[in-house]
Amino acid sequence: MSTEDQFGLEITELRLGLPGGGGGGGERKVKKRVFLDILGGGDEVDLCGNGGGKNRNMEVAVGWPPVCSYRKRTIIKMYVKVSMDGAPFLRKIDINGFKGYSDFVMALEKLFGLGDECEYIPIYEDNNGDWMLVGFVPWEMFTETCKRLRMKKKVLDGGLQTKNLMRKNEN
Amino acid sequence: MVYSLPEEVLEHVFSFITSDKDRNAVSLVCKSWYEIERWCRRKVFVGNCYAVSPGIMIRRFPELRAVELKGKPHFADFNLVPDGWGGYACSWIDEMSRAYPWLEEIRLKRMVVSDESLELISTAFKNFKVLVLSSCEGFSTDGLSAIASNCRNLKELDLRESEVMDLSGRWLSHFPDTFTSLESLNISCLGSEVSFSALERLVARSPNLKTLRLNRAVPLGKLSTLLHQAPQLVELGTGAYSSGIRSDVYTGLSKAFLGCKELKGLSGFWDADPSYLPALYSVCSRLTTLNLSYSTIRSPDITKVIGQCPNLQRLWVLDHIEDSGLNALALSCKNLQELRVFPSDLYAADVNVTLTEQGLVSVSQGCPKLQSVLYFCHQMSNSALITIAKNRPNLTCFRLCIIEPRTPDYLTHEPLDIGFGAIVKHCKNLNRLSLSGLLTDRVFEYIGTHAKKLEMLSIAFAGDSDLGLHHVLSGCESLKKLEIRDCPFGDTALLANVAKLATMRSLWMSSCAVSIGACKILSQKMPMLNVEVIDENGSLDSRLDSCLVEKLYVYRTVAGPRSDMPGYIWTMDRESANRI
């Protein structure tokens, strides 16, 4: 009996999407849950929904395309403008100076002198012109696609606020 | 009758044998040759730092002068290996500091190196000459200060692509005024500015300096000063290559390049301003290596430069070169051996750069010496691949990355099996291959059948079943390194080919279909392998054997299971999933 007989037609089960069911780094998972909660439900959120065409599918894969991190860090433009609702001034921040979302969000909050009771949610405009919640995509992809940032003030009805955000993207 | 030559004579003969493979062959001839050889071996390459322990290496080779080590798996470059995985150089450097007082050269790749280790290197080895840290991390500019201060005979300091904690640029000023032996310096990965006057004085007192790769912070306006001090340079990496509109900078630069009669390689070019490119035209005719892959200059400007470089052997460039630039390359550069085309925009919604498979086909047609290809693009066809294969049977390295996973032949919408099949069939000396696009098990059948000299294979988002993996493991006789991600390969193929794994350096599988149970069985059957499961979702003990593992790294070793693993890595051992 050749070894090939052992291979039936059954397709071995494979999980697609984020490798490891969420990728490395517990804190990244936590942030993602928080933002998904804000949007009003985890499972229904369609990660591939927001325009941008077919390339959205491959954005979910960590470490793809296989460009080494040194090259990624070196090529990308360094500084991104950050605005804050209600503030007359803009700031600039070097996204490449951070290793991940937790350092980055802390630095953002520090930049504007915001404390623990933060009334602002960081959102960003990506290369497709869509406004996204910070933390939604893998960190490396965020550094590549973020064009500018905005510290958006939370309103009392969090749901309405984010629904407006979604509607804005659809137009 | 047995004739034997005196030991001294044999030793003298062996001194002419420098390749590792030949040295290994010599040591296998007989016991006395083994003994003589091990005492006169001067350099060793350890492809996986966990395959052997420092103690074992030192016991066998007591008189080494040069050691090269590699740590993390290749996929660490793409953030697939979590932080804290390992690859610590510390224990190696500690033991070597005691065993090899006359060690001259240390080369490390993908390892974690501390400042303490750098300090130890700088003081323990009296005749230390060469330090190459390639894609390493864990050290700061303080460690570099120690190297600069203490290594009196240093010839080479190369930090290529390492992640350095950049505290300040002052470290460079620690090279003493009496230090004149520098031949090669690569600080291109450093962010902070070094003192320019210290740099200039260092260059001025280093008559043997052949390679100088600056970092981005060195302004273009100062480059000509350095070039005047070092007209003997063979390889130059510029800093930022723009300076506003400054005709004096341009003129100075032109003049300086004119004086560099030995220059063969150029790199750097960050933020390159195309108006400064003509300044280097005078060196173009001698150039054999050109790396423009950190510059965003566009096709017409790239084409103008390339048109001046008939002796080019190696070109690294962004996809801004487009098909038109590659057509020009094919016409001008008949000596081209290696081409790497990197993507300029990783997640572009619109493909605004006209680089297609045609560019690669042109180069394969026009450049008869082309051996090594790395090509990122958005579309490919079987017919293009077949043409490339037939044009260039002398290819030894073929790495194609079609940016969107599982992209089929854009003309026929078929998988790219027959295209890659043609590559392995025609290119009989292919030793490295990276696949992409839509691929079924069939491509692996072709690879297993034809790729007999293949040593390294990278697979992503490909295949239908275990049969694919089985073809590779059972057919590729020369396979040393296999790295796989996001493929439906699992237990059956792995367990049907356990013996194969002991003939390879390593196997990496992530987001595949391998179960914990299979890892345990593999480990039981093959005690000379370390079967390491990487899983950040918590302890394996609470899970069923049928659960799939996130990431698996298997490698042969004579050093037993390693003891420096973080909490999310388990070495499979005979009884159960134990963390040692």
Image (cartoon, rainbow, N blue to C red):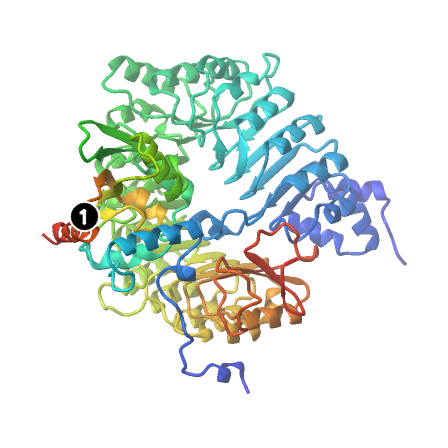
Residue B209 placement, left or right of B27: left
Amino acid carrying mark 1 in the image: Asp
Q: Position of residue B428 (x, y in %)?
A: 47, 61
> Relative to residue A110, is residue B424 depicted above or below?
below
Q: Is residue B293 visible?
A: no
Q: Report which quarter residue B324 is drawn in.
A: top left
Residue drawn at (47%, 62%) of the image? B550
Q: Position of residue B114 (x, y in %)?
A: 59, 35
Which residue is most to the right? B1
Q: Position of residue B489 (x, y in %)?
A: 46, 70
Q: Is disc 1 placed on a helix, strand or loop?
A: loop
Q: Quadrant of the N terminus of chain A?
A: bottom right
> Relative to residue B343, is residue B94 depicted above or below?
above
| Residue closest to the eye, B515 or B180 | B515
Which residue is most to the bottom? A1
Q: Report which quarter residue B64 is drawn in.
A: top right
| Residue closest to the eye, B40 or B437 | B437
Q: Position of residue B49 (x, y in %)?
A: 63, 48
Residue drawn at (24%, 61%) of the image? A46
Residue B302 placement, left or right of A13: left
Circle 1: is it few (<14), some (14-19), or many (20+) Cα within 10 Å?
some
> Relative to residue B507, is residue A104 depicted above or below?
above
Which residue is most to the left? A171
Task: Give the residue number, with chain letter if any, for mark 1.
Answer: A130
Residue B473 placement, left or right of A18: right
Q: Is residue A142 visible?
A: yes
Residue drawn at (38%, 47%) of the image? A67
Instruction: Using the image, name the chain to which the residue with label 1 belongs.
Output: A
Q: Report which quarter residue B573 is drawn in.
A: bottom right
